[in-house]
Image (cartoon, coloured by chain):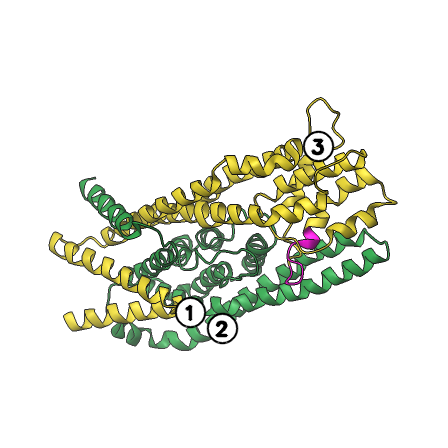
């Protein structure tokens, strides 16, 4: 990857991270969107879209409201696409194996990635206290400066999370890809089926949260109708 | 605020306030949540109403704990400024503006979070993932457009509705039956994820006999994973367990 590619990674990681935590919430932070965007910019759109589909539903119902901090699926998706680009040489021979392996790695790293988000929120407490002290002294203009300084804190946290995922993932893949044939032997299932397990687990995670009357009935109805339609069409 | 009275805050200023609402979470912290962001949203309008000499005293009332839904915050801001405008004219108001904001933030957050985060976002994401899994590469663009057209409109219009109706904006939210809408969206989401499941199974292209077996296995695996997740098992562990079990079954069959 050249310097321009890394600059694009930094830009997308920062913008998506801010959309997730600090600005607007226009859904740029959703794994399906940011992975596809990153993949398009890095020239690996197809595996990036596959990773977006795999990661999109896993933590969808971990709502970013109040003090709740969900695993960092945004940086996980961006980091996964960067890892695919870094190890793209293996894509032609081991496409699905690499995609599934990267998917599994970032699912674990996403849990660590949320620590950076929590750190940023603690740093922002100091900004609030500083703004409060200044207001007591009558310096009300510092409210604005301290508030928008929070953006840079969240941006740093996003970049740190992405860097951690890419660095850790690179080390593991660099050591592990020599054994990918053995891994493929241990996991003899069709790679497409293994990749489908990610959204299926995401579906289970959604159903586990959406506890309503007739949930199972509605789910099976949706399943049966769509399957029959796909067969007929 | 009655239409016949001249506006103290112009439409242009209200639009700018709506845009500032996009940044309400920029300094989110564990001490006062959106408190600092909420103060900055209101600051320029309060300065117009009270002038630079009184603004520090007014802002002290607002620089405290605040947390509400990010998509409905513009409505609350509009209503708060409307009450402040009345107060600045020396008129009696049923509730002080900062007390009004404190009173409505929790109910608005409850309704907004259930509708936008729990209902609409989930529905749109599941729908677009199903489309992407079926092979439509433009599904991510559709996700952004479908989410932002109604939500963006509400963010802009919300500030006008809040400003013109003042404290009555809560009644408007209640009349909208947003909580019922959230429930309907959640049910639609369940139907859509059923459809997504079918798309994923259908994409493997199996013969009829194997397809029937796979369908039954997939439904059982999903319901088994639901059981584990409801027992508090982390998602990553459930994911690894499902992959391991599918691999084991495949090895046994081979």
- Is residue B249 at all visible to an observer of this figure? yes
Q: Which residue is disc 3 drawn over?
A: B12
The residue depicted at 44 percent of the width and 47 percent of the height is: B119
Circle 3 or circle 2, nearest the eye: 3
- The colour applied to the residues of chain B in this rendering is yellow
- Dominant SS of magenta comes to loop
Q: CA distance from mark 3 to mark 2?
A: 49 Å
The green one among the chains is: A
Circle 1 or circle 3, nearest the eye: 3
Asked whether A195 or B31 is in front, the reply is B31
First along the sequence among labels 2 and 1: 1
What x and y, as percent, mark residue A91? 36, 63
Q: Which residues are magenta?
A: B29-37
The answer to whether the residue labelled 2 contacts the one labelled 1, judged by CB atoms less than 8 Å apart, is yes
Q: CA distance from mark 1 to mark 3?
A: 48 Å
Asked whether B250 or B239 is in front, the reply is B239
Q: Which residue is disc 1 drawn over?
A: A105
The chain to which mark 2 is attached is A
Q: Which residue is disc 2 drawn over?
A: A168
């Amino acid at each position: 990857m050249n310097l321009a590619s890394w600059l694009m990674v930094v830009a997308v990681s920062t913008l998506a991270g801010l959309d997730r935590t600090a600005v607007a919430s226009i859904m740029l932070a959703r794994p399906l969107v940011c992975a596809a965007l990153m993949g398009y910019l890095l020239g690996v759109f197809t595996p990036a879209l596959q990773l977006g589909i795999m990661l999109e539903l896993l933590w969808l119902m971990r709502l970013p409201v109040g003090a709740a901090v969900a695993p960092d699926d945004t940086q996980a998706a961006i980091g996964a696409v960067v890892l695919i680009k870094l190890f793209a040489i293996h894509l032609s021979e081991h496409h699905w194996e690499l995609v599934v392996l990267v998917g599994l790695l970032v699912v674990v790293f996403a849990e660590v990635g949320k620590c950076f988000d929590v750190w940023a929120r603690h740093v922002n407490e100091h900004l609030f206290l500083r703004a409060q002290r200044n207001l007591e002294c009558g310096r009300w203009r510092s409210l604005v400066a301290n508030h928008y300084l929070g953006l840079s804190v969240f941006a740093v946290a996003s970049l740190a999370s992405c860097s951690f995922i890419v660095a850790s993932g690179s080390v593991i893949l660099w050591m592990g890809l020599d054994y990918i044939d053995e891994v493929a032997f241990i996991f003899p299932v069709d790679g497409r089926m293994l990749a489908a397990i990610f959204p299926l687990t995401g579906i289970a995670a959604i159903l586990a949260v959406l506890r309503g009357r007739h949930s199972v009935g509605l789910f099976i109805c949706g399943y049966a109708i769509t399957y029959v339609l796909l067969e007929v069409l | 605020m009655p239409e016949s009275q001249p506006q103290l805050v112009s439409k242009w200023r209200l639009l700018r306030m709506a845009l500032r609402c996009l940044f309400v979470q920029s300094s989110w912290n564990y001490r006062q949540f959106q408190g600092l962001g909420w103060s900055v949203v209101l600051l320029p309008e309060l300065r117009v109403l009270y002038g630079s000499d009184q603004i520090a005293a007014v802002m002290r009332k607002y620089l405290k704990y605040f947390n509400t839904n990010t998509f409905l915050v513009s409505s609350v801001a509009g209503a708060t400024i409307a009450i402040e405008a009345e107060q600045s004219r020396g008129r009696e108001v049923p509730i002080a503006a900062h007390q009004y904001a404190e009173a409505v933030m929790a109910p608005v957050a409850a309704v907004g979070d259930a509708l936008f985060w729990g209902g609409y976002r989930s529905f749109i994401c599941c729908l677009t993932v199903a489309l992407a899994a079926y092979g439509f590469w433009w599904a991510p663009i559709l996700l952004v457009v479908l989410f932002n057209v109604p939500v963006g409109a509400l963010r802009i219009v919300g500030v006008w509705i809040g400003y013109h109706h003042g404290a009555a904006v809560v009644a408007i939210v209640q009349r909208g039956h947003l909580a019922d809408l959230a429930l309907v969206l959640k049910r639609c989401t369940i139907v859509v994820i059923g459809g997504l499941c079918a798309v994923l199974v259908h994409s493997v292209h199996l013969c009829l006999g194997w397809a029937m077996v796979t369908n039954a296995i997939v439904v059982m695996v999903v319901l088994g994973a639901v059981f584990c997740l409801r027992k508090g098992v982390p998602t990553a562990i459930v994911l690894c367990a499902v992959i391991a079990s599918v691999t084991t079954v495949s090895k046994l069959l081979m």
